[in-house]
Image (cartoon, rainbow, N blue to C red):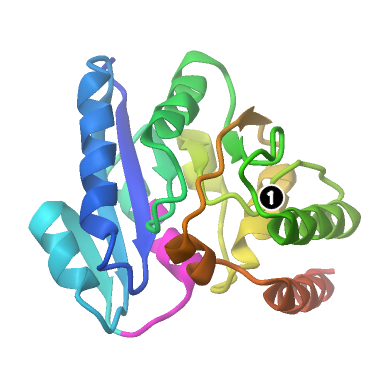
């Protein structure tokens, strides 16, 4: 495959696990000989050794201060745009996604005519803690009500973007609400969206790092305010 793919890993204080995450991703990509893929980390102003680990293992862009996961994702997509990548895929840095699910998303992007491919943990929620299922379903509902687009896992960090999506999706929020915003921007641009089932892999480490249901309420408030500002 001659098409260029950029795998983006937004990371904030993930030095404990980041080396293993990068290694697993690179091993998986190397086993898929048809993929012309690069891996990069966006270090979002981490205060631990994330920057050093990332720079030792792959291409890295670092924010001077912590700006938020939305800002880190925006930086990665802007890099993909400037460097003429045909596709981009985001994946979480805490190890909750299987590298094999990454290639599943990439293969869906390149083999079919979709612009946004969402790796959904909720098409089969096995392995996902019940409180996470509740919080994600609540945010999916709110995303549907506010923005008029329904998906099963708007909060997934494993998302694939076509070149058209890279150019059209303009993330404006810096916080976790960017996950729902991506789906909204895709709808605004009339992009073709599909979900593929992925497995949720949770450890004590990843559970301590992710969104809480309290955060979900903050996200809902921010989404409503963003919608109001753009009406």
Confirm whether the magenta stretch covers residue 73. Answer: yes
- Location of residue 133 with respect to 5 vertically, above or below: below
Residue at x 43% of width, y 79% of height: 67
Per the image, the residue denoted by label 1 is 154
Q: Position of residue 88 (x, y in %)?
A: 40, 40
Residue at x 16% of width, y 64% of height: 53
Q: Quadrant of residue 132?
A: bottom right
Q: Quadrant of residue 200?
A: top right
Furthest residue toward left: 56
- Location of residue 17 with respect to 110 vertically, above or below: below
Q: Position of residue 145 (x, y in %)?
A: 91, 56
Q: Quadrant of residue 2?
A: top left
Highlighted magenta segment, given as a residue range: 65-77
For residue 187, side relative to residue 169 (left or right)? right
Residue at x 24% of width, y 50% of height: 20
Q: Position of residue 144 (x, y in %)?
A: 85, 51
Q: Position of residue 141 (x, y in %)?
A: 86, 54
Q: Which quarter of the rendered picture does the N terminus lie within?
A: top left
Can residue 13 be seen at all in this image of the molecule? yes
218 vs 98, nearest the viewer: 98
Name the dominant secondary structure of the magenta segment: helix
Q: Which quarter of the rendered picture does the C terminus lie within?
A: bottom right
For residue 199, side relative to residue 25 (left or right)? right
Q: Secondary structure at mark 1?
A: loop
94 vs 142, nearest the viewer: 94
Residue at x 74% of width, y 53% of height: 133
- Location of residue 192 with respect to 71 vertically, above or below: above
- Neighbour class for label 1 at 10 Å: few (<14), some, many (≥20)? many
């Amino acid at each position: 495959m001659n098409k260029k793919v950029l795998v983006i890993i937004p990371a904030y204080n993930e030095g404990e696990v980041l080396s293993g995450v990068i290694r697993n991703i690179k091993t998986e990509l190397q086993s898929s000989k048809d993929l012309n893929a690069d891996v990069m980390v966006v270090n979002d102003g981490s205060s631990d050794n994330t920057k050093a680990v990332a720079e030792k293992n792959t291409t890295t862009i670092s924010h001077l201060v912590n700006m938020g996961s939305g800002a880190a994702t925006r930086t990665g997509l802007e890099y993909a745009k400037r460097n003429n990548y045909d596709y981009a895929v985001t994946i979480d840095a805490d190890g909750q996604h299987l590298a094999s699910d990454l290639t599943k998303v990439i293969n869906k992007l390149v083999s079919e005519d979709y612009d946004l491919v969402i790796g959904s943990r909720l098409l089969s929620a096995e392995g996902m803690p019940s409180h996470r299922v509740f919080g994600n379903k609540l945010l999916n509902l709110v995303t549907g009500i506010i923005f008029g687009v329904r998906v099963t896992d708007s909060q997934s960090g494993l998302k694939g973007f076509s070149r058209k999506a890279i150019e059209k999706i303009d993330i404006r929020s810096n916080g976790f609400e960017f996950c729902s915003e991506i789906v909204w921007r895709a709808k605004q641009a009339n992009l073709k969206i599909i979900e593929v089932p992925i497995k949720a892999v949770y450890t004590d480490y990843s559970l301590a790092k992710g969104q809480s249901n309290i955060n979900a309420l903050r996200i809902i408030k921010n989404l409503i305010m963003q919608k109001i500002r753009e009406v």
